[in-house]
Amino acid sequence: MTIQFISLNAGGVFAQTRLENQDSTGFTHVDIYELPYTDLTPYACLVIGGMCDQDFLFEHKEIISSFLDEGKIVVFSGNLVTDWLPGGRPFVPKEIKSFQDYAVKIESNHPIFEGVLEDDMTFNKGVAGFFARGHHPLPEGAEVLLTLDGKEPITYIDRQSTNGTILVHVGFDLFGYMGSNDLEKTTSRISPQLKQWVEEEYSKTIQGVQS
Amino acid sequence: MRKIAVVYGGSSQHHRTYKTSEFAKHFHQLIPIRELAEASFEDIDVLLIPSQTHLGLLKENVEKIHAYADNGGIVVTFGPQGFDWLPKHDWEFRITNFWWWLEKDAKSGLVLTGENHDLFQNYLTLSDATWHQHGVYWPPEGSEVLVATEDGGAVFYIDKVSSKGTWINTTLDPDFHYGSYFMPATERFLRGFLPWLEEGKI
């Protein structure tokens, strides 16, 4: 099933650079402030990052919850700081005592992270801490994919808060690993596998909503 | 004490640095960027434009910000800039080496040229202003360059010649990295820089 993704552009310098470097097949990018004027009908998945104006998202939270209630999918990467995402709770930073506290662990085998090594997520050029620096407390019934050192959940899937599916990751844009310059690392598998998972997930949720 | 207003973009990084951290107390006013066009600057002494500000909305307000400086206001910008809008700043993009500190005999390549300035006499050290850079400025003659690269490009400068007011421009982005829970130097930078903006000799 081929589906369309819509990604909100936060509008700053880093977002511009990302747009220029990313493989955007299947993705439509719109400025965050265009959200209320955008027809979301053609899109199955809404991609949002923590660099977006979260006060603005809060003001327009109904757009996001309605989108989800149609059985669609939201992928959020970043730190939540306002209450705009169904089931979402504010980001909690981790108090770090040693680099081991930043160790990324796979909690349950999942197609998004299939073949991805924990160390490749934990370390970037030998330095830990790029993948996640804290966590979001879980909504009820959420499925945990990754943790920090077996403790705090850093990536989860929430199928209970809405009719759709929400994936929340506490670090950088999980779709940002497309066109990654670290192609020799297993993290380059994440973005295409995430895209594949969204397509399969959508075909399941949309059947549930229609039946 | 000078009153500082910041153009607030609502990202998680801005939320931490400007709204909820120990640094929030330094800001007299947060101006949501969507309200910048209507905002009054009458009650403030310093206008700070953060890193990763929305480029489209910034573009719409460039003239207003210049007018504020032309009327004697102090404008502060954190880097990197997404388009040319600072007065005669002559920005030169350079490939960022995020990893300089992993290299043997690591040198950041930064030189303190403003060692006699109040900011570096009483508030900051060079190491507090040392992390990666995204490029350099070649500011107009008469500007005071406080931190430079070894070849003389400006990383931090004060320009009192382009307007009746003052432009304080740096390519550094302490607010973004502090707001991302990255890099302790950015925290030390803000601990010195913001009190200086409020009460130091500019």
Image (cartoon, coloured by chain):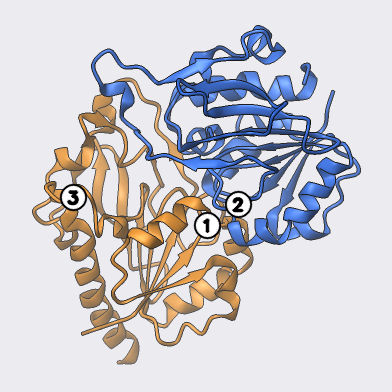
Disc 3 with disc 1 on a shared chain: yes
Residue drawn 69% across the image and 55% down it: B33
Disc 3 with disc 2 on a shared chain: no
Vertical order, A128 against A165 (above or below): above
Vertical order, A11 against A125 (above or below): below
Q: Amino acid at mark 1?
A: Cys
> Which badge, 3 or 1, is on the more N-terminal residue?
1
Instruction: Give the camera-side residue of A47 and A182.
Output: A182
Q: Which chain is orange?
A: A
Instruction: Give the camera-side residue of B169 and B7.
Output: B169
Left or right: residue A56 versus residue A106 is right
Residue A150 in the image: state x and y as whole percent.
22, 38
Q: Chain of mark 1?
A: A
Residue A109 in the image: state x and y as whole percent.
12, 55
Residue A187 in the image: state x and y as whole percent.
18, 50
Instruction: Give the camera-side residue of A4 and A156.
Output: A4
Q: Amino acid at mark 3?
A: Thr
Left or right: residue B41 versus residue A38 is right
Residue drawn 48% across the image and 35% down it: B177
- How much space separates mark 2 and mark 1, taking CA atoms? 7 Å
Q: Is residue B74 visible?
A: yes
Q: Which chain is blue?
A: B
Residue ID for mark 3:
A187
Asked if the residue under mark 1 is in contact with the one under mark 2, i.e. CB atoms within 8 Å, the reply is: yes
Residue ID for mark 1:
A52
Q: Amino acid at mark 2?
A: Gly
In what quadrant of the picture does the C terminus of chain B appear? Answer: top right
In what quadrant of the picture does the N terminus of chain B appear? Answer: top right
Left or right: residue B123 versus residue B161 is left
Residue drawn 71% across the image and 20% down it: B195
Q: Is residue A76 visible?
A: no
**Number of other residues with Cα within 10 Å of mark 1, as a class: few under 14, some 14 to 19, many 20 or more:** many
